[in-house]
């Protein structure tokens, strides 16, 4: 059996750990395009459109939901917007069902023509870089906030210790 004082100390420690875990959950992992090898790049001819192809650009991971949301926002800002779509088997369907360009699992898929292939891939590369820059900025802000919280917690602990020491030196008379 533990004393109530020991119980409170243990509870305080667990609470701080839970708070620190909750704060750090806000960090976002970067996602990058894998190297594009022309020989293995998945390119499929769209039968409904003349001279139009579906190209799947591989990512190095399945992006976190926050990264996907940032990507979607950046995509909507582009001067030459690539449309987004939903596929019935997507792990993260986003966008508008009438278009076939999208972020799906660990690929970004685009519909393009042979003449626009290079330009469209460069647009996706730039979008990924922009999103990762936003991730860096976000993570920097989260880390700064975490440091402030840690500093505040440390200051609070020091204040509590000082209060206890003061009471030990000059205990209240009951």
Image: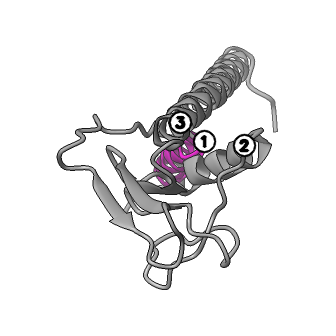
Q: Are marks 2 and 1 in contact (CB under 8 Å)?
A: no
* Residue occupied by mark 3: 128
* Residue occupied by mark 1: 23
Of the image marks 2 and 3, the number of the one nearer the N terminus = 2
Residue 148 in the magenta stretch? The answer is: no
Q: Is residue 53 above or below residue 130?
A: below
How far is the residue under mark 3 from the one under mark 1?
25 Å
Q: Which of the 4 image quadrants contains residue 129?
A: top right
Who's the residue at 49% across and 55% down the image?
A: 7
Quadrant position of the C terminus in the picture: top right
* Residue occupied by mark 2: 80
Mark in front: 3 vs 1? 3
Of the image marks 3 and 1, the number of the one nearer the N terminus = 1
Decide which of 88, 17 is in the foreground and name it.
Answer: 88
From the top left corner, tell me how far across and down residue 156 is, in percent. 70, 25
From the top left corner, tell me how far across and down residue 84 is, in percent. 64, 63
- Asked if residue 72 shows in the view, the reply is yes
From the top left corner, tell me how far across and down residue 33 is, in percent. 38, 39
Who's the residue at 78% across and 42% down the image?
A: 77
The prevailing secondary structure element of the residues shown in magenta is: helix
Side of 122 relative to 60 (left or right): right
Q: How is the image coloured?
A: one colour
């Amino acid at each position: 059996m533990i004393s109530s004082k020991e119980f409170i100390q243990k509870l305080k420690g667990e609470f701080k750990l839970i708070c620190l875990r909750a704060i750090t959950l806000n960090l976002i992992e970067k996602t990058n395009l894998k190297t594009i090898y022309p020989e293995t790049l998945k390119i499929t001819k769209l039968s409904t459109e003349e001279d139009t192809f579906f190209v799947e650009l591989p990512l190095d991971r399945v992006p976190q939901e926050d990264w996907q949301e940032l990507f979607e926002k950046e995509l909507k800002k582009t001067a030459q917007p690539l449309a987004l779509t939903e596929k019935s088997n997507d792990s993260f369907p986003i966008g508008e069902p009438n278009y076939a360009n999208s972020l799906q699992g660990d690929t970004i898929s685009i519909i393009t023509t042979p003449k626009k292939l290079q330009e469209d891939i460069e647009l996706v590369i730039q979008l990924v870089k922009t999103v990762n820059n936003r991730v860096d900025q976000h993570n920097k802000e989260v880390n700064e906030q975490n440091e402030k919280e840690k500093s505040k917690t440390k200051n609070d602990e020091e204040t509590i210790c000082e209060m206890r020491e003061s009471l030990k030196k000059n205990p209240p008379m009951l």
